[in-house]
Amino acid sequence: MREIESIKITEAIRDMCIEANHYLTEDMKKALNDATESEKSPLGRQVLCQLEENLKIAGEDMIPICQDTGMAVIFAEVGQDVHIDGSLTDAINEGVRLGYTEGYLRKSVVRDPLDRVNTGDNTPAVIHYDIVPGDRLRLTLAPKGFGSENMSRVFMLKPADGEEGVKNAILTAVKDAGPNACPPMVVGVGIGGTFEKCALLAKKALTRPLNVPADTEWARAMEEELLERINKSGIGPGGLGGTTTALAVNIETYPTHIAGLPVAVNICCHVNRHSVREL
Amino acid sequence: MDRHIEAPLKKEDIESLHSGDYVYISGTIYVARDAAHKRMNDLLDKGESLPIELTDNIIYYMGPSPARAGRPIGSAGPTTASRMDKYAPRLLDLGLKGMIGKGKRSEAVHEAIKRNGCVYFAAVGGAGAILSKAITSSEVVAYEDLGAEAIRKLEIKDFPCIVIIDKDGNDLYETAIEEYRQE
């Protein structure tokens, strides 16, 4: 049994909140840079150049990349040989509270979906736990903005809808999102499982590096085909027309029921933020 | 075509703006988003006056991140405008002339824009750091308890926007996509 102090978890989460909201990962920066090179629309290129300049200013002047610094989503992979002093959930939420207050990040969380009183410190986070072998704790933090979250969808397809049905569902979600989701977007897709499992897979897919393809062969082929078709939709950067509507399509799959074919599409804007640490 | 215009908006500027124009706005604008719109709408329902002057003004749909010391504002990019569609036609009928946001608008908003000779601009979503550089001052003028959703008065200098819907109802989100659609 390995001991991890909860204060270390709090400090890591605090730093990750600040880091993720000011710097994108290298794969995201490269994808944006490649898009700026290849975009055909002059206005689209202007938007992409503005986004690259925005990233530079965010890091240099410590101004969040986007004012919507998101609701903090955390994937915690807890090794079964790890022991933590105190509550892991409390330690994570305390890290979010510190990160969002000390880091000048926007507090975007309300305590109740209907009375809508702001909690004032961006807590609570949405935390997904996974118990894994080993004695490490792996934390992935993905602050999720709601411009794109609001455009996300779950489709409970029938097995007979098959591959074409899946593709159409994903294309429908992307086209309906259009300019609202701050394109160029990253499209996270979960196929299979149950109603909630496919949504979780879609969220997780957004944290996979853009240069790492799906595990299964058909999903890899579908990622490539859909990216090409999405970029032919004409939506373009900022929805102002162009050849770059998505930077990547990331698909995750899971076994499912004989009667079902669940598909979730979690759309993320071009500020596809995440930070990973292992304790 | 790149244009420089002033806020509050002048009638002749609105008349000469076309869907697709890239404009730099300087002057005074107001900031309000979901919760502030709901409160303003409730005031109007009760027949009370609003905390801001609407005539000829622009409302920017935005909720900034907190300002660091010595800066007027934090990250300050546009939020999705369609969430304000329920309230916007009423404000446009009362004299509001411009809106800055991002994303599609409803048919009712299109109609109110045409009926009143208004304009809907978009700023680039997710470019909050760079857009904050065009904001020279920010003051909370109402609903301070709403935090990031309070109503603010901003002074802006060469704030970059694109005309999405012009006074005739032309919508760049519809026309621009057609030009690059390949399927």
Image (spheres, rainbow, N blue to C red):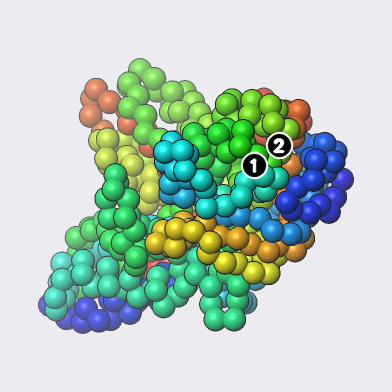
Place of residue A122 in the rendered image (x, y in percent of width and height, measured from the top left): 35, 63
> Which residue shows up at 29% across the image and 76% down it?
A10
Mark 1 closeness class: few <14, some 14–19, many ≥20 residues within 10 Å: many
Determine whether the residue tagged by mark 1 lies in a helix, strand or loop.
loop
Left or right of B36 in this view: B9: right
In this rendering, the answer to whether A63 lies above or below B107 is: below
Chain to which mark 2 belongs? B
Residue B150, percent across and down? 48, 58
Left or right of residue B108: residue A199? left
Residue B96 — which label? 1
A268, above or below A190, in the image = below
What x and y, as percent, mark residue A124? Answer: 28, 61
Depth check: give the residue in front, A170 or B110.
B110
The answer to whether dots 1 and 2 both sit on one chain is yes
Residue situated in front as seen by the camera: A243 or B18? B18
From this viewpoint, is residue A98 visible?
A: yes
* Quarter placement of the C terminus of chain A: bottom left
Query: Image point 33% across, 71% down: which residue?
Result: A97
SS assignment at label 2: loop
Residue matched to label 2: B118
| Chain letter behind tag 1 | B
Residue at image position (64%, 69%) is B137
Kind of residue at badge 2: Cys
Query: Residue at 66% across / 55% down in the picture?
Result: B29
Provide residue B96's location: percent of width, then percent of height.
Answer: 64, 42
